[in-house]
Image (cartoon, rainbow, N blue to C red):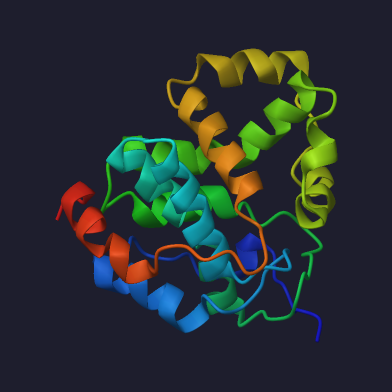
Amino acid sequence: MNAQYQHPSELPRPESAASIDSVLALYEEFGQLHYDEELAQIDHALQTAALAVHEEASDELVVAALLHDVGHLLAIQAGRAEGESAVPAQDLTHEAVGARYLAGLFPPAVTGPIALHVRAKRYLCAMQADYIQGLSDGSVRSLELQGGPMSVTELRVFERNPASTNAVRLRRWDDGGKLEGLRVEPLIAYVELLQRVSFL
């Protein structure tokens, strides 16, 4: 069944997350759904976080890896979109939506890389000729909607952003966290970490 997507201007703007429990509730309710990948949202989140842990990333960056696509869940929640590997007709800027949603709970070390992880894909496409060949079908399909490879001017602006280095690291884990059947730590394993990193 194809998803029915709405442009961001047509969706209610999510308030900032009220608590870690409210964020976890999103994953519990919608995590088994798909967005533009074959893998369920929760599986992709957990695999991405596992890669960050494997590379001994900071606590904040592990949280960013875990929650980087929360904007997709907010879109699903608002539009009740569902379906496997569906592609929206327009870019829903899930990275910006997700970063805003988490900003009241987590520091910029978490939200900065999340806000930039789509631009990091565009950056890597421009900087590495073979990068696009390793992208999932969903990421390739969404690339055009997201602006394609960066221009020279965009590259310079991106590189000046203090969060850009960690955004690129997050992007690579994002790309790697899309394996069917991979067993990783469950969501509950990250609750203490989320609490420790959170402002609240």
Q: Quadrant of the N terminus?
A: bottom right
Task: Determine if residue 69 is in view.
Answer: no
Viewer-side residue, 31 vs 77: 31
Which x, y percent locates residue 97? 50, 54
Q: Quadrant of the C terminus?
A: bottom left
The image quarter containing residue 152 is top right
Residue sitting at x 44%, y 73%? 27
Which x, y percent locates residue 180? 67, 66
Does residue 134 lie above or below 80 as drawn?
above
Does residue 115 lie above or below 129 as drawn?
below
Residue that protrudes farthest toward the bottom in the picture: 1
Task: Determine if residue 125 is in view.
Answer: yes
Does residue 172 lie above or below 26 as drawn?
above
Viewer-side residue, 89 vs 9: 89
Relative side of 18 to 27, left or right: left
The image quarter containing residue 19 is bottom left
Which x, y percent locates residue 159? 56, 16
Residue sitting at x 68%, y 20%? 154
Viewer-side residue, 72 vs 197: 197
Does residue 189 lie above or below 53 as drawn?
below
Residue sitting at x 31%, y 41%? 60
Residue sitting at x 79%, y 41%? 134
